[in-house]
Image: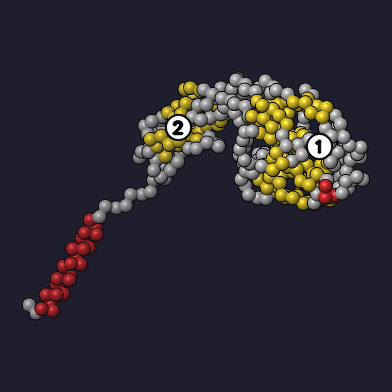
Amino acid sequence: MPLSVKVVAAATLLVLVSASQAVAKPPVPPRDTQPPTIPGNLRTTNVTQTSVSLAWNTSTDNRQVVFYGVWAPGLSVIYVNHPGTTATYNNLHPGTTYAFRVQAWDGMNWSLPSNILNVTTQPDVVAPGAPANLALTDSLHGFPVDGVTASKVLITWVNSTDDFGPLRYEVLVNGVVNPNVDDTRPQGLPITSPHKVWVRQLDPATTYTIAVRAIDGGGNISALSNTVTVTTDASSDTAGPTTPVITRLHDGGTGACPEEIWLWWTPSTDSNTPQNSIEYEVRVNGVINEVFTGGFNAIAYTEVPGVNVVTLVAVDPAGNASAPSNSFTIVNSWTTSCV
């Protein structure tokens, strides 16, 4: 047989063998499009102040169930390999409601979510310790300041301890909670000790007794701190500034805590104070958020989740305050405090 004929015959045989092998391959199975059944009867087996233990009924599938995903808004997903049907969340906050769900995964498809199980952790019933070492101070951020003026005083204390927290503090002036307190801690940063705040809008030449108390996340109130007594400086100024008008306000769009508040306003005037010495209290939901001196615009920061109603109050050095300005509202999408 000529060599050329042998080459053609060999090539033909190779093609036939390759074709037979290709035909012999098993067919590709169809993609699994059927999800597992919904896990049933999601329920609690134990609830403490900081943990929730869950159980549910097994799902079935036309092929296999690989694992389950347990979740709740604001919490991480816990994955449980099948056939396990229990999970425990730890490090939760006391007295808080969580909406749990569970879904099954077969390697290709998620089942629909189970029933929603709302679970409230056991409440915190232990009050914080009392704040300690309340005192007047004339130092702020490492620099000397006038800690007692005609309208405000700077106080400091050692923070309380608590089993859970988070803690917030109320300043009582002559036994009444004072709403005009400016925390010197920048918004979004942790509360450190010693804690320093300005008590504002006091009357000139007046003696006050000041105390502080702590409140935890469960609403438990500490005993009062020690008290300090202070007399503000004298001033004959009794006329307040005109009311500022916020002309424009919007959030900074960071989507994270603390959120920026960009605002512009028409400056106030005062018969005894130049405009560049008038202080402006940026208030969020009625609470002093930050204080700026002079000017007509600022960037403030807020750590308040949800609705923030922002107003502006002008205050002169004698503590005379304007009426609150018009209000603007922003809404922060994050749902928990950043401190």
Q: Is residue 77 above or below residue 26?
A: above
The type of residue carrying mark 2 is Pro
From the viewer's perspective, tell me whether residue 98 is left or right of residue 184.
left
Q: Quadrant of the C terminus?
A: top right
| Residue labelled with disc 1 | 149
In the image, what residue occupies the spot 69% across and 40% down? 140
Marks 2 and 1 close (CB-CB < 8 Å) = no
Label 2 vs label 1: CA separation?
Answer: 66 Å
Visible in this render: residue 232?
Answer: yes
In the image, what residue occupies the spot 66% across and 45% down? 259
From the viewer's perspective, tell me whether residue 117 is left or right of residue 333.
left
Disc 2 element: loop
Q: Sequence-wise, which precedes: disc 2 or disc 1? A: 2
Disc 1 element: loop
Q: Is residue 278 above or below residue 18?
A: above
In the drawing, what numbered circle is on residue 39? 2
The type of residue carrying mark 1 is Thr
Image coords of residue 188 (percent x, y): 63, 41
From the viewer's perspective, tell me whether residue 257 is left or right of residue 89.
right
Q: Quadrant of the N terminus?
A: bottom left
In the image, what residue occupies the spot 51% across and 23% down? 47
Image coords of residue 77 (percent x, y): 48, 37
Image coords of residue 108 (percent x, y): 41, 45
In the image, what residue occupies the spot 45% across and 35% down? 78
Mark 1, Cα crowd under 10 Å, few <14 / some 14-19 / many 20+, is many
